[in-house]
Image (cartoon, rainbow, N blue to C red):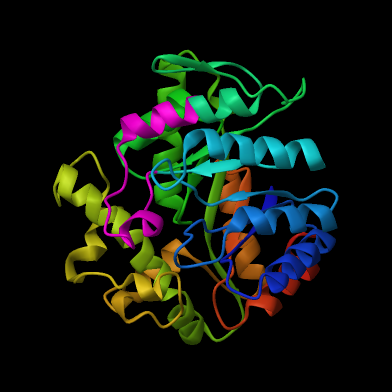
């Protein structure tokens, strides 16, 4: 199982670069960042510095979206980085949460997301695409260029789209029951579309907090349930609170949710996440000493997970990264 590191691009950018360099030294395989250009600094600028100072680390957004960035720009950004540093980027993409909503705009549609994934991949790999009345091709993309497109999602229609069109699946929670349900749904969609289900890379992303003070760790990771709750609220609106199409294990906990303050998005201590119970934090996140981390990771691996990406947004960021490098990654 690969281990990735997810960071927010808080200033100073040099700290993000240094942490990613250290992550590669410790055996992490992927370096991800949020892509919400109003709340944080521009990630693609920072990726160039990370790639320059590393030799193996694969980088990308977790996740970008087709609403705030022109699709041809996304393709060109990745193609440029890949041409400079080898094929070492992944385009993580979704409908858009904070990047869109912080501007008062709704996430994009799945239909638009599907179209964008096709265009981004084709252009970044040097093939022509039809943009309405114009055929466009990036002429300088070298032969052999490759850009995997991994899609994030939760609901049945999104999971169907992953199975039909994406190279990888990003699930932003580590609950084994929900991992099993979503992976099974994605693979069934891939098979129905005539694809090899095993060809889709499965990436689970969630906070990991290494330590023995479980109550404190829960408080530091509770923000994540609030972030996921934004997507869950969309599912409840679409499918209903008790729909058989979406497991209650995913939707039930947001009953006490009352809005969300994006100025504290992804931050420990976010008061918009007080509705998230301890039980959900325990299911969605990895909390505890290295042995507990390894136990959950082993379970995720059995369920078909290829990568676990750590959301490191809490007061023990550096020590958790070091603990993974010293005690978790070697054991894997």
Which is nearer the eye, 195 or 278? 195
Is 192 left or right of 234, judged from the image as shown? Answer: right
Q: Is residue 107 magenta?
A: yes
Where residue 67 sits: x, y (%)?
Answer: 38, 44
**Residue 113 showing in the rendered view:** yes
Image x and y of residue 77, in percent: 63, 41
Image quadrant where one finds the C terminus: bottom right
- Give the residues drawn in magenta, as a range: 95-118
Locate residue 81: give its quadrant: top right
Location of residue 79 by image quarter: top right
Q: Position of residue 203 (x, y in %)?
A: 56, 46
55 in magenta: no
Q: Is residue 190 above or below residue 177?
A: above
Q: 261 or 286, which lies in front?
A: 261
**Count of labels in the image:** 0
322 lies above or below 133: below
Q: Is residue 28 visible?
A: no
Q: Residue furthest front?
A: 134
Is residue 32 left or right of 256 when viewed as pictured?
right
Residue at position x 32%, y 75% in the image: 273
Image location of residue 148, percent across then percent down: 62, 33
Decide if residue 121 is on the left or right side of residue 102: right
Q: Residue at x 50, y 45 (%)?
A: 170
Q: Nearer the viewer, residue 224 or 283?
A: 224
């Amino acid at each position: 199982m690969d281990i990735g590191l997810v960071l927010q691009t808080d200033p100073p950018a040099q700290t993000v670069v240094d942490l990613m360099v250290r992550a590669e030294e410790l055996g992490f395989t992927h370096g991800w960042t949020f892509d919400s250009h109003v709340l944080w600094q521009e990630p693609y600028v920072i990726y160039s510095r990370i790639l320059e100072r590393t030799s193996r680390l694969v980088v990308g957004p977790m996740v970008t979206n087709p609403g705030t960035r022109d699709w041809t720009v996304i393709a060109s950004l990745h193609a440029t980085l890949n041409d400079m540093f080898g094929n070492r980027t992944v385009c993580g993409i979704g409908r858009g949460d904070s990047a869109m909503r912080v501007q008062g705009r709704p996430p994009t549609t799945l239909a638009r997301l599907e179209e964008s994934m096709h265009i981004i991949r084709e252009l970044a790999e040097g093939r022509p695409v039809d943009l309405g009345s114009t055929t466009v091709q990036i002429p300088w993309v070298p032969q052999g260029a490759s850009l995997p497109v991994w899609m994030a999602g939760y609901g049945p229609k999104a999971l169907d789209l992953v199975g039909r069109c994406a190279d990888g699946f990003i699930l932003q929670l580590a609950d084994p029951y929900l991992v099993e349900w979503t992976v099974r749904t994605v693979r069934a969609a891939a098979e129905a579309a005539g694809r090899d289900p095993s060809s889709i890379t499965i990436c689970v992303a969630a906070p990991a907090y290494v330590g023995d003070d479980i109550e404190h760790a829960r408080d530091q990771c509770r923000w994540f349930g609030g972030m996921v709750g934004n997507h869950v609220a969309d599912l409840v609106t679409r499918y209903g609170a008790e729909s058989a199409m979406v497991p209650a294990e995913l939707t039930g906990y947001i009953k006490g949710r009352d809005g969300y303050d994006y100025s504290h998005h992804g931050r420990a201590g976010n008061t918009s996440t007080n509705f998230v119970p301890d039980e959900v934090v325990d299911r969605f996140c990895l909390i505890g000493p290295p042995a507990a981390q390894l136990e959950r990771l082993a379970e995720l691996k059995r369920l078909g997970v290829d990568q676990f990406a750590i959301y490191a947004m809490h007061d023990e960021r550096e020590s958790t990264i070091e603990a993974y490098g010293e005690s978790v990654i070697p054991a894997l």
